[in-house]
Image: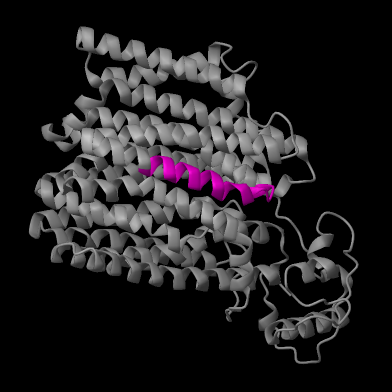
Amino acid sequence: MGRHTRPDDLGEPGVAQSFATESGVGRHARLWDTASWSALGSPSYGTGQGSVHGDVAAETVVLQRIAAKIREDTIHEPQTPELDARDARRNTITMLGSRVAVAAMGWTGSMIVARALSPDDFGKFSFVFGLLGLLSVVTDLGVGRVVLAKLVECNPWEVSYVTTAFIALRAALGMLGHLLAIAYVLVMGYPSDVVWATVIAGLVVVVATPSHALTVMYQSRLRMAYVAVAETLGQLVQLLCTVAAVLFAPVLLVLVVPAVINEIVAIVVKIRGVRNGIAGPVPAARAQLWRWREMLAEAVPLSIGFALITILSKIDVLMLGRMDSFDAVGLYTVGYKFADLLGIVASTVVGPVTTLLVATWPGDTERFRGRTREAAILLTVLGAVAVAAFWPVAPALMDLLYGSRFAEAADAGRFLVLGSALSMLTELGLMVLVSTSRHRVYPWVALAGLAANVALNLVMIPRWSYFGASIATLVTDLVLLAAIWIVVARTVPVRRLFPAGAVVGVAILGFAVTVWATLLTDRFHIPWIVTAAVAPTLVLAGMQFLPVAGRIRLVHLLKSR
């Protein structure tokens, strides 16, 4: 029986009986304990009581035969993969490099599209993909974050069935999301070209949703290098297709197609790695749909919270499209191109860290605290670097990349980037709650943030258009950051998880560098490329040589332990 052997590959018939194991002690005992299985809504293997599904009975039969025929030391017990900080940092660096490359190619593609389309058509292009982004309310549901814990801690045969059910669930959600997007633009009476663009571009949701399930598999084993290759290759193909479309058919309905091709390429590469066992045990041949209920039930509080946050992050684009014009949407979303880069950085850092947090909770609270504080400081440094690099040169950079008409949206872009820097710490706080199963309060925080954001947009968009929307976003991000870490402090029984002193110190350093860089650039007309290079370098140097974060220096955050 190999490492990736599945129970359904053994073909063992028999009668359902109890499966005895001697792994009833240790941190994984709860996965095999009768009470724990009952709590999950699964049958009680030790007593013969409970509701036994047909597939589960078959699994029990197989395990009974394995127990009888194979020596005890060959049975796979539940085992957490060997996950450590070295693996997490290696994955973080790999994914960060990949996603920077992906973002660069995405920027290039968006610049080409912005120059090829009219202002109104580019606004429609931005609106369609903003709407599809909002659909992660339906297509994500927070299930991936709940399933991650199962993939980290379950034994191989269980992982095979969990992953198959998870992939099937996300495939169904992707198709549902596509239908909802089409229904929305039809009901709201948008022009026919917007409707058809949504029909075509919506295939991104159909493909990307199950593709993310494969990404979670890789994340559970800290094998994100394969995902990095898949995403980079997909984005490269998209860029080449975008160039071809602009040269031969520069119209809205053609220019949305490359995004679909991107997702197809990426999922094909991921599937190849999964079939080779790189992402852990190979998914089972049969999808046990009864597991959907368990996944969704555990994810309900998280799903509601993430749904509200996703709506919060996209509602400004939809409100701007209804209360202003598609041209304003186009100007506003260019600022989001830069802000979204920080979102990519945050997910790149937080993803591997979340795996470590899940693996260390609750058995090693010291390591849990250390990883959380370390990640918070690193995210603060990255946010300060990004703001210092972008804020002083925003008008010149947007003029260069997108054209002179987009330079007027520089202030909105600045506020969006600053808000995104704050959101990185918010995402980390949320992952701390998820890792400790303390995320049930989160939906209320998200609901309050959404209500505040909608209220602010209703007041500010009519007065200041897209600039007002950026102010509303920044204020909301600040409120959410404070709220989420207050919840962490009050619910997680580990003290000093948030390194407030270090975060404030790094923030002051970033603020000082940004202000002086902006003043000197405006006063002496310093070339933007010089400022964009020197300002973040000063932040990094200050982090290394000044005691802004106490005893922690930049090299401490980067080196492996």
Compared across the picture, whether 370 is left or right of 175 comes to right
> Could you say where residue 254 lies in the image, as x and y percent from the top left?
16, 62
> Could you say where residue 182 lies in the image, as x and y percent from the top left?
28, 68
Residue 8, image quadrant: bottom right
Q: Is residue 445 one of those drawn in magenta?
A: yes
> Could you say where residue 256 lies in the image, as x and y percent from the top left?
22, 59
Residue 28, image quadrant: bottom right
**Residue sitting at 69 percent across and 32 percent down?**
370
**Residue sitting at 66 percent across and 56 percent down?**
149
**Residue sitting at 52 percent across and 34 percent down?**
481
> Could you say where residue 450 lies in the image, as x and y percent from the top left?
43, 45
Kindly tell me whether residue 337 is visible in this rendering.
no
Check the image and report above or below for 480 versus 544: below
Kindly tell me whether residue 207 is visible in this rendering.
yes
Between 539 and 498, the one nearer to me in the picture: 498
Check the image and report above or below for 223 versus 376: below
Look at the magenta stretch and give its main secondary structure: helix
Q: Is residue 449 one of those drawn in magenta?
A: yes
Check the image and report above or below for 508 versus 379: above
**Residue sitting at 38 percent across and 60 percent down?**
135
Compared across the picture, whether 381 is left or right of 559 comes to left
Magenta span of residues: 434-454
Coloring scheme used? one colour
Q: Quadrant of the N terminus?
A: bottom right
Between 66 and 205, the one nearer to me in the picture: 205
Between 519 and 278, the one nearer to me in the picture: 519
